[in-house]
Structure formats: structure tokens, C-alpha cells
Amino acid sequence: MKIGDELAERRPCFSFEFFAPQTDQGVENLMERVRALRILNPAFVSVTYGAGGSSRGRTLDLAKRIKRELDIEVLAHITCADHTRDELRSIFHDLHAGGIENVLALRGDPPRGSDAFVAREGGFRYATDLIALVRDEFSFDIGAAGYPEKHPEAASLDADIANALRKVRAGARFLITQLFFDNDYYFAYVKRARAAGIDVPILPGLMPLTSYEQIARITRMCGASIPPSLRAELEFRAEEPQAVTDLGVAYCTLQCTELLARGAPGIHFYTLNKSPATRAVVSALLASRTAWDVRLRGPLESAGVTL
């Protein structure tokens, strides 16, 4: 099923993101984790696109295998990085033959050790160009990335919103946001997006915290900020891994509850290939559905802004 249709018809949509492991045993372990999440009835799972050739091949194989063996809708990440147009066309033909109907079209990160993205000769420099190729030559539903705290390379929030609008006009049917830990960033982003003319669903991306060191590294890479109060609680528990995980699950559950109560179309979970924390969050949400199922009218909805 096309994810754009699913987001229009099903509320809320819970989805989970994984990356392709480097070994065959790692792939088998991940398949078991994805299988364990089926009980939560995800709208889809996404599989990220690695920086190396072998991991990219595993990404494509894993996406097709999840769809074939587990009958779960898959969103396959594809990036412009280090590909020519013809190589990208070959990848999309392969995905289509494997039954994949949805792709997340991304520019990709600069090479490790570099601050600048350089397109390969015969390739694309911008995600917008990749989206246009998919729209013009294939029948995939197309998703794109959104950045509530702006993309690290964007000159301003307004410039970042303008770029998101270009992605939508090029053919993106939904946006998935970068992770954030302060819901105000998401609501402000949606308000700016709607004012700019972006009318597609904007799915918030969240990550249940399970490691103090890991989240510090990830936020440095992607530019997401940690609220001072949350940072203080994490630092207080830095030497207690289980306490960090417990706090992360509780905090993410509270984030989800507010987002859903105020009308977010669902939650996209960055799992880091670890299912227990995500399962705990979603299970708590399903068990306490009355806490968010009756939508609270927040400032955006009062102003007529659709999340």
C-alpha cells in the first residue's frame, strides 16, 4: 500500500526505522526484531541506506525480504550520494521488482571527514532532483525529510522550509522529520510549513533514549538539541544504563502522548535496531489510548493548522 494513502486513511500511523546490519547473522537478528514488532501493527517500517556499497546492497535485500516474508509495508531509503542517474534507475527497477511501493528520497550525507556534499558526475546534487526522477519515471510513493530545528546546512529556518516546499512540489507525498526532543520545535515547524503552502502529512520522528553516550553522539551529528532539563536528568543517570533507558522510554511516551493528542498523524520511531524500548513506548500508548485519542485543541488547531 502507498504510505501517502495510509497516512490519509489511518490514524495514528506508527512506523519503525532500522538500518541494515553488516553481517548475515546481524540481518537474521534484525529480522527477528522486526517480526516481534508485528504485534504492534506498524503502518510501515523503513530501512536506511548505508554509505558503503555492501551495506547498500544489504539495505535493498533487507527491504525486499521484510516485504516478502513479513508482509509489512516498507519504506526504502535511497540517497543521491555516490550514484549516477542510471545507477539510481537500476536501483528503483530492482525495488519495484521486489514489490516495494514506497521510497524515502534523500540527498545523503557528505563523505566522512568532509563538510561539503559533492555530487558524483552524472548524479544529483539535491534530493529534489531525485524526487523528480522518481515521480517522472516510476510509480513509487515518495517521502522526504523535514527538519524541525532546520537542516545543519540551511542558512535559516525559512530557507529550510522553502527547500521542503520544493520537495513537495517535486512529488513528495509526506515528510518524516529528523528526531527532536522538544515538541515545540515540531509544532512550530508544522505551522511554518502550512503557512508556506506545504499541505502533505508531516510525521514526527522520535528516538527513545537508551544510551547517554549514543544520544550525545547522534545529536552532534544531526543538529538536534536536548532540552536542559532532560540533559540534566540524563547526566544524573549517566553511570546507570538501565536508569537512562527507563527515563528514555518514559520521556518518549510523554512526547508521543502530546503529539498524538494534538493531532500528529502518527509517530516514526528511530529504533537504532533495538526493539525493546520502542515496543515499550508503543505498548504504553496503546494501553493508555484514552489519554491521547480524544484530541486536545492546541494553539495550532485553534488557528486552523492541520498537523
Image (cartoon, rainbow, N blue to C red):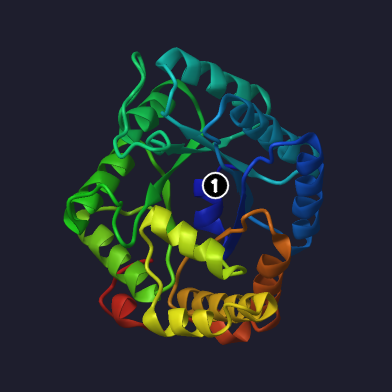
| 128 in relation to 155, above or below | above
Q: Which residue does the numbered mark 1 point to in the structure image?
A: 3
The residue that appears at 28% across and 73% down in the rendered structure is 304
Amino acid bearing label 1:
Ile
- Number of labels in the image equals 1
Figure quadrant of the N terminus: top right
Image quadrant containing the C terminus: bottom left
Question: Does residue 2 appear left or right of residue 86 in this picture?
Answer: right
For mark 1, give the secondary structure.
helix
- The residue most toward the front is 239
* Left/right of residue 76 with respect to residue 68 in the rendered view: left
Could you tell whether 240 is left or right of 28 in the image? left
Residue 23 in view in this figure:
yes
- Please tell me which residue is depicted at 41% across the width and 37% down the height of the picture: 108
The residue lying toward the viewer, choosing from 27 and 261, is 27
Q: Position of residue 273 (x, y in %)?
A: 67, 53
Please state which of residues 262 and 184 is positioned toward the viewer in this rendering.
Answer: 184
Depth check: 43 or 159 in front? 159
Q: Note whether 23 is above or below 293 in the view shown.
A: above
Quarter-of-image position of residue 157: bottom left
Q: Dividing the picture into quarters, in which one does residue 84 lie?
A: top left
Instruction: Say if residue 204 shows up in the picture.
Output: no
> Badge 1 local density, few (<14 within 10 Å), some, or many (20+)?
many
The location of residue 278, given as percent across then percent down, is 66, 66
Q: Residue at x 39, y 24 (%)?
A: 133
Report the front residue among 32 and 238.
238
- Image coordinates of residue 184 in percent, x first then y, are 34, 75
289 sits left or right of 178 in the view? right
Q: Residue 104 at x, y = what percent? A: 48, 40
